[in-house]
Image: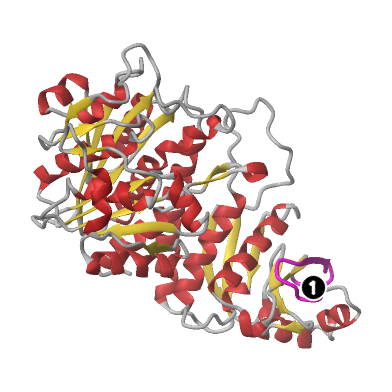
């Protein structure tokens, strides 16, 4: 879909549909008032009769064939004094869904002209674009019959009564790049595990390298991982017939500067291995590669934006299956770092593949390392499905990621990572156990990873509660691509 920015009086716009916001208690927004006064009180008369209360998410479509615009769409925005970041995104999403049902090929939206405390026009354009893209996303690739819909919306203009400046135009470019990255992450997560295998992920990374000149991809196979001594990663792969892959993407946009490394967990299906999971809901374990998907999506976004940075994306990819050769509880393996690990639970496999990938990332001498993983069910219990769990060994880096999440609404919450928590991972037989007891499971998992990041500025995002939705709306969310891209935009001085 095409997006644009335009300015001018709301009553002069020619469009298949023009969109205005209405606040609770039937209060017209300023652009709506301008339109209303120029058209004989058309809108105020309707809402005065109770057709539109202004409740958040409420919509009302009005045919206006006698005016320059064919239709007017009113979108409820809730209380004016509570119209914040999230209320703005919800209004944009409600608009997108309503427009999708109208059959209008193009629309002009004055929702972007609404004031959001602390947010400028560029922010409203970018976040509006992302909200619309998210609301209109569909995954129907594998359906023999697509859902019948009216003619798709082809273009949307973010309108302002006054000139919003050049930054709003740049916001379109940034928003489109992030939206493309989010959609890629969603698509990868939503694909079934018989299609989205480790080899498929590798092929997608190679395809990105062909599309973008500053991006290269190298894929390491099992023999190469054996030569590197990746005993932890290969221990997880032993039970599967699918060949494991270590995918290494390098974006070179920053000259000779040290890179930022993004490491994403790529378990393309997780049965739990010998410590097998219950059958109910196991189909959702195809989403256990959403950390990997977020790395690919972020690499796509920054390559599209041509950021002046160097970034390395590393994805350890494998299945976790209970085959005859599968690793058993009680096995001890040697990681690439040389540390030995007692595997007490084969369903704590994500940290095993990540620890070798984190060690591998050291060869690039990264300035910063961020790993992203659907790592622990304990994170879902602690934080639910709204925010990512965030831990790290550098408070400055953690605060950068927290701030990026606040800008994008893709928020995280810091959990403690005290040394005392790591005592739960002590082993009688190896350097470290891969699990402790049930207490503070999210923190002890991060504590395990911290053993492989000493001397490196490192942060860990646990996205187990945020990477996908269950139930009727089941599907990948594409998070945390917005957070990661914003973090990198800030690093590049373009935030």
Q: Residue at x 81, y 79 (%)?
A: 43
What residue appears at the point 36 percent right and 33 percent down from the top-left corner?
204
Q: Residue furthest front?
A: 428
Using the image as rendered, state which of residue 484 and residue 151 is in the foreground: 484
Colouring style: secondary structure
Residue assigned mark 1:
67
Question: Which element is circle 1 on?
Answer: loop
Looking at the picture, does residue 411 appear above or below residue 145? below
- Residue 174 in the image: state x and y as whole percent: 40, 61
Which residue is farthest top? Answer: 324
Q: Please name the residue shown 30% across and 23% down the image.
A: 237
Q: Quadrant of residue 51?
A: bottom right
- Quadrant in the rendering for residue 30: bottom right
- Give the dominant element type of the magenta stretch: helix, strand or loop: loop
Q: Is residue 379 visible?
A: yes
Is residue 371 at all visible to an observer of this figure?
A: no
Q: Position of residue 442 (x, y in %)?
A: 37, 50
In the depicted structure, whether residue 380 falls above or below residue 413: above
| Number of numbered labels in the structure image | 1
Given residues 227 and 491, the one toward you in this image is 227
Residue at image position (25%, 44%) is 425
Q: Position of residue 53 (x, y in %)?
A: 81, 76
Magenta-colored stretch includes residue 58? yes
Q: Residues within 10 Å of mark 1 (few under 14, many from 20)?
A: some
In the image, the segment drawn in magenta is: 53-68
Point out residue 233 in the picture as x, y percentages from the top left corner: 25, 30
Q: Is residue 38 left or right of residue 350?
A: right
């Amino acid at each position: 879909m095409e997006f644009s920015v335009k300015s001018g009086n709301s009553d002069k716009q020619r469009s298949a549909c023009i969109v205005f916001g209405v606040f609770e208690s039937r209060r017209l927004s300023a652009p709506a008032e301008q339109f209303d006064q120029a058209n004989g009180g058309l809108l105020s008369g309707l809402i005065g009769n109770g057709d539109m209360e202004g409740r958040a998410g409420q919509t009302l479509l009005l045919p206006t064939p006698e005016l320059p615009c064919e239709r007017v769409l009113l979108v409820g925005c809730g209380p004016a004094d509570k119209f914040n970041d999230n209320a703005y995104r919800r209004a944009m999403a409600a608009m997108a869904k309503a427009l999708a049902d109208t059959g209008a090929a193009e629309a002009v939206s004055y929702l972007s002209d609404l004031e959001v405390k602390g947010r400028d026009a560029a922010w409203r354009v970018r976040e509006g674009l992302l909200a619309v893209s998210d609301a209109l996303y569909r995954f129907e690739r594998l359906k023999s019959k697509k859902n019948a819909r009216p003619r798709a919306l082809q273009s949307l203009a973010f309108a302002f009564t006054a000139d919003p400046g050049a930054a709003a135009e740049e916001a379109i470019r940034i928003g489109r790049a992030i939206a493309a990255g989010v959609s890629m992450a969603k698509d990868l997560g939503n694909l079934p595990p018989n299609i989205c295998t480790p080899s498929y992920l590798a092929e997608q990374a190679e395809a990105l390298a062909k599309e973008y000149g500053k991006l290269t991809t190298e894929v390491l196979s099992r023999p190469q991982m054996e030569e590197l001594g990746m005993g932890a990663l290969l221990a997880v792969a032993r039970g599967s017939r699918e060949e494991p892959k270590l995918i290494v993407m390098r974006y070179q946009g920053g000259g000779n500067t040290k890179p930022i490394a993004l490491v994403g967990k790529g378990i393309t299906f997780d049965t739990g291995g010998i410590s097998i999971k219950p059958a109910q809901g196991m189909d959702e374990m195809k989403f256990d590669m959403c950390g990997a998907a977020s790395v690919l999506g972020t690499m796509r976004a920054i390559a599209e934006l041509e950021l002046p940075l160097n970034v390395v994306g590393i994805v350890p990819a494998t299945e976790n299956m209970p085959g005859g050769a599968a690793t058993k509880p009680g096995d001890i393996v040697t990681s690439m770092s040389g540390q030995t690990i007692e595997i007490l639970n084969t369903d704590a496999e994500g940290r095993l593949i990540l620890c070798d990938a984190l060690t591998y990332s050291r060869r690039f001498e990264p300035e910063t390392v961020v790993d992203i993983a659907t790592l622990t069910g304990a994170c879902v219990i602690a934080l639910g499905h709204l925010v990512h769990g965030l831990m790290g060994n550098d408070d400055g880096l953690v605060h950068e990621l927290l701030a990026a999440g606040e800008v994008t609404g893709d928020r995280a919450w810091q959990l403690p990572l005290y040394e005392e928590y790591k005592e739960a991972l002590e082993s009688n037989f190896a350097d470290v156990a891969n699990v402790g007891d049930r207490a503070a499971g999210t923190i002890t998992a991060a504590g395990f990873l911290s053993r492989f990041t000493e001397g490196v500025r490192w942060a860990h995002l646990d996205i187990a509660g945020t990477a996908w939705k269950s139930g009727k709306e089941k599907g990948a969310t594409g998070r945390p691509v917005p957070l990661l891209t914003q973090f990198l935009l800030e690093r590049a001085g373009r935030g």
